[in-house]
Image (cartoon, coloured by chain):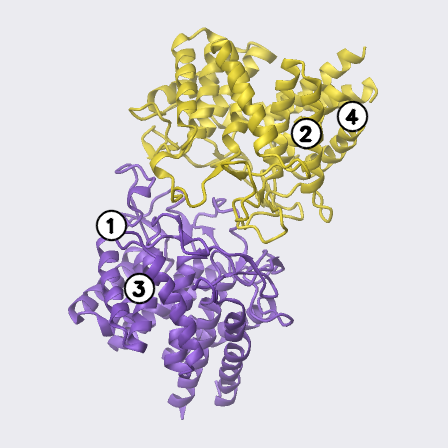
Chain colours: A purple, B yellow
């Protein structure tokens, strides 16, 4: 692609990040009274629910620390990060240091620490904030949480796990996937041997255990000996999840200078995308059953913001790293779909949930799962990726 | 309504039950090798998954015992009921007598007894089968499960409950609702004082604690002092749930000869229906937020078979008991929508899941939640209700 086109995209993503998306969250999200962030924001930014979801508290604190570090050291950005960090320090975890799933506006626990991704995003936030500010309480917390996550790997839900043991033990893709990213995020704070070991494990799991070598599809759940389980869980595909994981793996491959891994990640990413694309209405399905059976998830055919935004990152990186023309073709196709359908030209920020036809299903800008994360992270990543593309091709 | 029209509907529901729906389950559902029933059946009846879900095992065993008892004493129907009962006896529960949520085809436990409705539908099945056959092991089991359910009422999920105590304790509508029906189902087996007490409690909860007196809307979750909780859970409405509960209450009112309660149940039922009806595309929404905020449930705008079938029962009974012309108008409207959209004229039985527009979303005939229950029960109930209407008006 010529530099002018790359520059055009790069500018678009940068401007949208800085002039549209970040201001939306700066304006509507911080809770100046109790700390932390509101994330349940309607189409116009109005708060419709004040509960605080720990995933989203961590993710937003991380996002604003990243903006401060990598975009511009604006004090107001660091301050927004800080109010999330302080809220998490004060109210986020129980006496074992495990993070609750949700809290009231004031910080009282609502839902028990059954979900290890609360811990993952808290660690991500503490790590970035600590590195940016030098706050050692935060960096220490990040390291300690990371180590606890590794310990809880085998049964992340703990006593809340409802699976009867030994009948059909399955392992799930989400944690190795998130660790692929978290490990690089926290690398400056971790022992280098632990980093390499964790990366080795992640590559092994993400690109081996969960990947079917014949179809290049990634399964959400596998048997303990890495086989196929002919069950609802075992047949489940989540193309967006798999695609997101592939850009984590591309980052790892780049860091390790591993060309073969890089090519493989791009190949796997494209396989999910081609499989998951809705040829009738456009967009990427949320869930599919690999045998074409009806999935359990009633929302299976919906089009979700994060799936499409993560795909844009993966395609941009795939293109930057390999110059594979299929990455470029797909990037333009997914870009057109995504900006046309998800971007809200009148009220700012992006819609999160569309029906199969690509019509808005819920007009929220934030909720229990959508916060200040996938949209700004993708805008940032695509902007920076195409900037690098340009540099490299000069 | 004149008798000819009532007779026409009555015939239609009866014939569809006996010539279409029951034969479908007779043919495709029994597992002659391991016992119990397959419920994951595709559009044509082919088994696409062999897991056995305890809700649906109990519900089908109950259904076939009811057919044997109330329609015709066909040995093959009792035999189908028996294979579900035997399967539940052998494999259904843990050492505490609590019922698992799901089992493998062979009966090995898959998901722990976190869901008390497994117990409710097991009790319903054992009760009916025992009463029909005189099998005292079954009737004893029914009584014992019922008593355990009452003991577990305050925290039905037990250790799997993820709600942090005391921050925002809510009570949920589903158990009192199901008990309204289960209690009458098991009445011949229970101590009459317990029956009356349970009924009193149910009326108090269903028609009081969960009901908003101003709007006549029923809430899925209320605070412990019966107030409104301004939270995702607290704002949640499930019109189908509320409507189904109203025909349970009508049955109770009829049994107690309580005209006032009957009128009130009809009024509440119509209020949910008018509130939950999708004026744009027809059909009843699955979930709504009482303040018009985006619900958490991504499937909120879908049209589900059970919602519409339970509504037909409630309207038929409402009409039979009160001759309220709004019941009749609504019955014809919901009947038209339901038969046009859910009934599968080519392969038999009914679709379960439509999108907002009323197009088939998943073409399964059975799955994890849809089994041999709501369709045949509704066909049976509407048939019998309009039969009675005729008799009464003669």
Please name the residue that numbered disc 3 is placed on. Answer: A123
Q: Out of B81 and A198, give the one closest to the viewer.
A: A198
Q: CA distance from mark 3 to mark 2?
A: 52 Å
Q: Is residue B190 above or below residue B36?
A: above
Estimate the x, y position of residue A120 in percent, counting from the top left.
32, 60
Estimate the x, y position of residue B145 in percent, counting from the top left.
40, 20
Residue at horizontal 42 percent and vertical 25 percent from the top: B119
Q: Chain of mark 3?
A: A
Q: Out of A232 and B205, give the one closest to the viewer.
A: B205
Q: Kindly indicate whether the residue at mark 3 contacts the one at mark 1 (C-beta within 8 angstroms).
A: no
Q: Kindly indicate whether the residue at mark 3 contacts the one at mark 4 (C-beta within 8 angstroms).
A: no
- Crowding around mark 3 (Cα neighbors within 10 Å: few <14, some 14 to 19, many 20+) is many
Please name the residue that numbered disc 2 is placed on. Answer: B312
* Left or right: where B391 falls relative to A376: right
Residue at horizontal 43 percent and vertical 82 percent from the top: A74
Q: CA distance from mark 1 to mark 2?
A: 48 Å
Q: Is residue B213 visible?
A: yes
Please name the residue that numbered disc 4 is placed on. Answer: B324
Q: CA distance from mark 4 to mark 1?
A: 59 Å
Estimate the x, y position of residue A281 in percent, counting from the top left.
60, 60
Instruction: Give the farthest residue toward the front.
Output: A33
Q: CA distance from mark 2 to mark 4?
A: 14 Å
Q: Nearer the viewer, mark 3 or mark 2?
A: 3
């Amino acid at each position: 692609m010529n530099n002018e086109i790359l520059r055009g995209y790069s500018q678009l993503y940068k401007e949208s990040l800085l002039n549209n998306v970040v201001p939306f969250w700066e304006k509507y999200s911080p809770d100046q009274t109790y700390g932390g962030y509101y994330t349940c924001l309607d189409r116009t930014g109005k708060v419709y629910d004040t509960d605080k979801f720990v995933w989203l508290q961590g993710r937003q604190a991380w996002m604003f620390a990243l903006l401060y570090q990598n975009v511009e050291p604006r004090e107001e950005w660091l301050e927004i990060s800080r109010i999330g960090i302080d809220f998490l320090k004060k109210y986020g975890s129980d006496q074992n240091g495990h993070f609750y799933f949700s809290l009231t506006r004031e910080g009282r626990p609502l839902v028990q620490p059954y979900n290890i991704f609360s811990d993952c995003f808290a660690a991500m936030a503490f790590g970035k904030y600590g590195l940016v500010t030098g706050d050692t309480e935060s960096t220490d917390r990040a390291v300690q949480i990371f180590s606890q996550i590794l310990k809880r790997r085998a049964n992340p839900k703990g006593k809340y796990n409802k699976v009867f043991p030994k009948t059909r033990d399955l392992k799930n893709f989400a944690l190795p996937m998130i660790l692929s990213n978290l490990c690089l995020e926290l690398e400056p704070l971790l022992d280098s041997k632990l980093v390499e070991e964790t990366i080795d494990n992640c590559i092994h799991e993400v690109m081996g255990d969960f990947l079917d070598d014949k179809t290049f599809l990634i399964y959400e759940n596998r048997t303990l000996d890495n086989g196929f389980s002919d069950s609802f869980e075992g047949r489940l595909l989540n193309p967006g999840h798999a695609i997101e994981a592939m850009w984590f793996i591309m980052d790892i491959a780049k860091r390790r200078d591993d060309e073969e891994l890089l090519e493989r990640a791009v190949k796997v990413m494209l396989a999910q995308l081609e499989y998951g694309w809705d040829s009738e209405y456009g967009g990427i399905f949320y869930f599919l059953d690999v045998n074409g059976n009806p999935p359990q998830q009633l929302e299976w055919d919906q089009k979700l913001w994060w799936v499409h935004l993560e795909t844009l990152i993966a395609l941009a990186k795939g293109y930057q790293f390999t110059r594979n023309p299929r990455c470029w073709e797909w990037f333009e196709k997914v870009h057109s779909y995504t900006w046309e359908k998800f971007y809200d030209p009148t009220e700012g920020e992006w819609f999160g949930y569309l029906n199969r036809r690509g019509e808005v299903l819920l007009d929220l800008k934030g909720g229990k799962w959508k916060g200040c994360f996938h949209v700004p992270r993708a805008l940032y990543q695509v902007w920076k990726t195409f900037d690098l593309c340009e540099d490299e091709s000069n």
